[in-house]
């Protein structure tokens, strides 16, 4: 490995850590929405914390250098791609199992939990 590649390993790993924090907190927030009394406030506070920590993290890691910023961003995006690829198959299988339990001829629920027939 070249010295430049070695020097960019730490910013890349820092981007992975920042991304894991950001998307992990997002996941926790979304899972808490059905049980909270104030979902809008929870979303707003979570977004503020996630953005503040991420922006400060990127700023500190970059140190005014574009190559370090790009390495950090690559780690952030890399962890997002990894997490989505691991979570999406579970979500699809859950949707399929819910469709199996629906009585024949029953339409799937649309946004807001209403059936398409209720809009007619």
Image (cartoon, grey):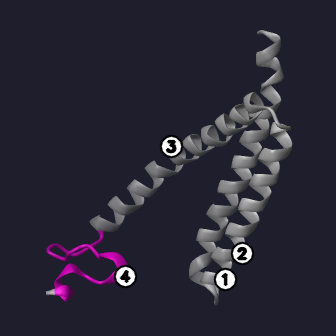
Provide the residue span drawn in magenta.
101-119
Left or right, 97 with respect to 87, comes to: left
- Badge 2, how many Cα within 10 Å: few under 14, some, many 20+? few
- Badge 1, how many Cα within 10 Å: few under 14, some, many 20+? few
Residue at 13% across / 87% down in the picture?
A: 120
Residue 48 in the image, given as x and y percentages of width and height: 72, 68
Q: CA distance from mark 2 to mark 1?
A: 6 Å
Residue 58 in the image, given as x and y percentages of width and height: 77, 45
Q: Quadrant of residue 6?
A: top right
The residue identified by callout 1 is: 41
Q: CA distance from mark 2 to mark 4?
A: 24 Å
Q: CA distance from mark 3 to mark 1?
A: 29 Å
Q: Is residue 68 magenta?
A: no
Residue at 69% across / 48% down in the picture?
A: 19
Task: Mark 3 and mark 1 in contact? Answer it, CB < 8 Å.
Answer: no
> What label does residue 85 carry, if any?
3
Comes first in the chain, label 2 or label 4: 2
Q: CA distance from mark 3 to mark 2?
A: 27 Å
Comes first in the chain, label 3 or label 4: 3
């Amino acid at each position: 490995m070249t010295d430049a590649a070695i020097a960019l390993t730490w910013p890349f790993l820092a981007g992975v850590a920042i991304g894991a924090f950001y998307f992990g907190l997002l996941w926790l927030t979304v899972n808490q929405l059905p049980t909270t009394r104030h979902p809008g406030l929870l979303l707003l506070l979570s977004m503020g914390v996630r953005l503040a920590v991420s922006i400060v993290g990127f700023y500190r890691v970059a140190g005014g250098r574009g190559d370090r910023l790009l390495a950090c961003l690559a780690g952030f995006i890399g962890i997002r791609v990894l997490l989505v690829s691991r979570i999406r198959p579970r979500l699809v299988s859950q949707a399929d199992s819910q469709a199996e339990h629906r009585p024949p001829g029953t339409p799937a629920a649309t946004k807001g939990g209403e059936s398409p027939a209720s809009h007619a």
